[in-house]
Each structure stands twice: as C-alpha cells, then as structure tokens.
Image (cartoon, grey):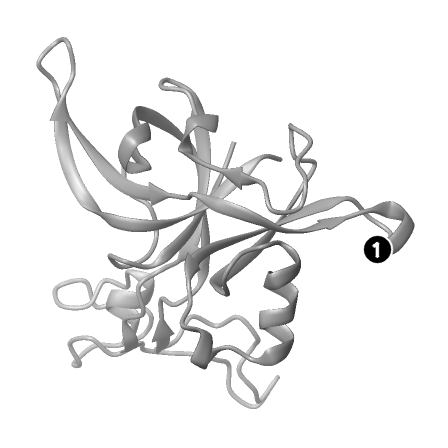
Amino acid sequence: MSGLIGRKIGMTSIFDENGKNIPCTVIEAGPCVVTQVRTIGVDGYEALQLGFDDKNEKHSTKAALGHFKKAGTVAKKKVVEFQNFATEQKLGDLIDVSMFVEGEFVDVQGVSKGKGFQGVVKRHGFGGVGQATHGQHNRLRAPGSVGASSYPSRVFKGMRMAGRMGGENVNVQNLRVLKVVTEKNLLVIKGCVPGHNNSYVIIHK
C-alpha cells in the first residue's frame, strides 16, 4: 500500500461549490526519502523504508548516520516502512505529495492525544450524575459495582474502570482528499485525524 509520512498542521474549514462548510485537517505530507529498499532475497519480504523530517546530526547515532548516508541524505526523525508500494522506487528517491489526487480516499494513522488518568464517565461514557447506574446510589461519578461476591472472588478481565486514556495508535479510514497543494507539500483532508498539532501521521492510499 502506497503512502507518505506527514505532520499534522491543524484543523480548519473550507466551503465547497454548494456553499457547505466542510471541516478538514491540513497535513504537511513529505517530501520523504527512500532510505532502504527491502527485498525478498535479502530481507525475506518486499518493502520501502521512507524517512521524513531532518534530524540534527549531533543527536543521531553513528549507525543511523551511516544508514542514511547510503541513501545520500541526512538523518531523519521519523522512519516508516510501506509494503506493496504501487510504484517501483530506488534508494535515495524523493516521494512527495503529488502522488495523491484530489477526490481520492486515504487512511490516516497516528497516536491519539493523551488525556492522562480519567474516570469511568469520561473514559467509558458511564451515566454519572442523574443516571445512577452500575449499582451506585449516592455517589456522583463512581463506577459502582465491579464484580460478584464470594464467587468468583475476583474482577473479570476487561472490566471498564478508570485509567489512562488516549495515547494509542488510531487508524481513521476513508477520508477524502479535498486539496493537494504541491508547491507547499500540503494535503487538505476532510474530517479529523488522530494526534495533536505537529504530531507525525502516516497517510496510506
């Protein structure tokens, strides 16, 4: 599946030809350098390794510097492999946002915003105030009953409880490409994508 590494710039909205206001996300997609070509003979599978976003040389290991030097490029902050790439590429090739076409659908993968330790009302949508469910009767946002008594004398795995929320890999599918700004390496995609502003995202065709 072909794709690019990008950076989420932020959200905005545009008007279509019918005057409808469409919420959208702006992504700086590429340009990405082919830093390694995986082959069946050497690696046992076929894939393209792409690098994005230049990294300061003093913050890179010698092993990483040598790896990127083979591709004729500087060290990169984000490296991702793409299997079943649509076009054949060579080491050191540059892939930019022109691979996308306006109107096509893409999948965007990223790490969702971390929200820290949250209770059951925010994390799982429990009723809370006014809808005292799950065995509670006089506490406002408590989880209520979480298990049986003497048997099985434990809480079952998967019980919805308070805990850390967010910071997970999220893949949003079938987002329409509204605009491709080639000269600025920008993609305008309908809807929202996971992650905070300036976070890395992976766009799959």
128 above or below 80? Answer: below
Report helix, strand or loop for mark 1: helix
Residue occupying the point 36% across, 77% down: 164
Q: Nearer the viewer, residue 150 or 119?
A: 119
Q: Quadrant of residue 142?
A: bottom left
Q: Residue at 36% across / 60% down in the picture?
A: 112
**Residue 24 shows up from this direction:** yes
Task: Determine whether 82 is above or below 51 in the image.
Answer: above
Q: Between residue 164 and residue 47, name the one nearer to us.
A: 47
Crowding at mark 1 (Cα within 10 Å: few <14, some 14-19, many 20+): few
Left/right of residue 92 with respect to residue 124 in the rendered view: right
Q: Tell me which residue sits at (48%, 62%) in the image.
A: 76
Percent of width and height locating residue 179: 28, 24
Q: Is residue 154 found left or right of 48 in the rendered image?
A: left
Residue at screen point 30% across, 71% down: 120
Image quadrant where one finds the N terminus: top right
Is residue 190 visible in the rendered image? The answer is: no
Q: Amino acid at mark 1?
A: Asp
- Reading the image, the residue beneath label 1 is 43
| Closer to the camera in the image, 173 or 117 | 173
